[in-house]
Amino acid sequence: MKPTLFLLAAGMGSRYGGLKQLDGLGPNGETIMDYSIYDAIQAGFGKVVWVIRKDFEEQFRTQILSKYADKIPCELCFQALDALPDGFTVPEGRVKPWGTNHAVLMGKDVIKEPFCVINCDDFYNRDAFMVIGKYLSELPEGATNRYAMVGFRVGNTLSENGSVARGICSKDDKGNLTTVVERTEIERVDGKVSYKDDNGEWVAIADETPVSMNMWGFTPDYFEHSEAYFKEFLSDPKNMENLKAEFFIPLMVNKLINEGTATVQVLDTTSKWFGVTYAADRDATVARIQKLVDDGVYPNKLF
C-alpha cells in the first residue's frame, strides 16, 4: 500500500506575518508545499491529505487543490479549537489551537494507511521523502507501533533571522529514538547552536545533534493512541489553566517510547532544511529554490 503524505497547514504563520502556506516562492508562483508534494510523488506516495482551518477552505481549494486534480488523490480535514472529545469544552479565554498532535488527530477518518506528517512551510528536499517513503512502503501489511522520524542536523536547520522551534532528539545504538524534547527557541549564540531551557538559560549543543523537523512516519494505530492521550492531556488541570498549552507530536511520541508501546526509527538523510520562519527568510528561500531549478533538480514549472 502506498503511503499518504499528511500536511499540517492550519497555522497562519504569526512570525512570518501572513498565510505563508500560500506564498508563491518558485519561478511560477509555486509554494513550498508544491515542492514537497512533487517530491512525495517522485518518492511513491499515493495520496495527499491536508489539515487546514475551515475559514480558508475556499481559497485553499482554488489556489492549491486545483493544481493536483489529475496528479494525485487529495483530501482535506479541518482543525478547530472546539474539536474535542465528548465531555470536554474549550476553556474560557482560549484562542490558540491545541497543537500539532491535535492537528494530526483530525486525519483519523480519512487516513487508513501508513502516512508521513510534515509541515507545509518547511522545504525538506527530496532525499528526505525518498527515505521516509521507502520505510513506510516496506512495512508489513497491518504493522503497528513501528514508527519513524527523519532526523536533520540542527546546524542545517537554523534561520539567520531569529530563533526556531525544533524537537531535540536522542537515539539508542539501534537507531531508535529515545527522547525528543521540543525547544521553542534555538539559534546561534556566540557562534554555537544553543537552545533556551525552561529556566530561560541558553544551553549549547553540537551542530550534528539530530532534531525533528516534524517529518514523522506513522501507521493508523497512532490515531488511537493519540485520542486516548489527548483525553489525559485535557484532564490535567494545568493544561486547561494554561491557555497556550499545546498537545505536541513529541509529547505523544515520548509517551509511547517511554512506556514501551512503540519504537521510532531515526532515519538519516542527506537533505538540508530551509524555510520561511520569518518574513526576512523569504528572499533567501526564493534564491535557493531558483538555484535548484537552475541545477535541474526541479522543472521550471512543477504542475
Image: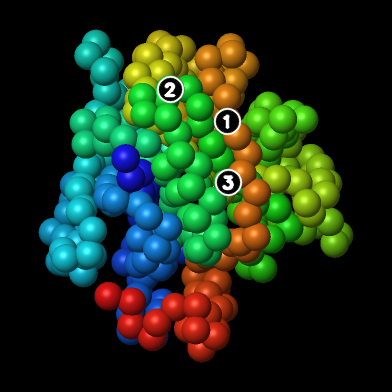
Marks 1,2: beta carbons within 8 A: no
Residue 54 point in image, percent of width and height: 18, 47
Marks 1,3: beta carbons within 8 A: no
Q: Is residue 246 visible?
A: no
Image quarter of residue 21: bottom left
How many C-alpha atoms fall within 10 Å of the one at disc 3: few (<14), some, or many (≥20)? many
Nearest to the eye among marks 2 and 3: give it: 2
Residue 193 point in image, percent of width and height: 78, 54
Q: Residue beneath label 1, please? A: 264
Residue 40 point in image, percent of width and height: 39, 58
Image quarter of residue 4: top left
Compare residues 282 and 236 and report the one nearer the observer: 282
Say what amino acid the circle numbered 3 marks.
Answer: Val
Say what amino acid the circle numbered 1 marks.
Answer: Val
Identify the mark at residue 150; answer none if there is no mark: 3
Q: Earlier in the sequence, mark 1 or mark 3?
A: 3
Q: Earlier in the sequence, mark 1 or mark 2?
A: 2
Residue 299 point in image, percent of width and height: 40, 82
* 289 left or right of 67 in image: right
Nearest to the eye among marks 1 and 2: give it: 2
**Where is 72 relative to 141, above or below?**
below
Spatial CA distance of label 1 from label 3 is 10 Å
Q: Earlier in the sequence, mark 2 or mark 3?
A: 2
Q: Secondary structure at mark 2?
A: loop
**Where is 130 relative to 241, above or below?**
below
Spatial CA distance of label 2 from label 3 is 18 Å
Q: Residue beneath label 2, please? A: 144
In percent of the image, x 26 and y 18: which residue is there? 85
In percent of the image, x 68 and y 40: which residue is there? 168
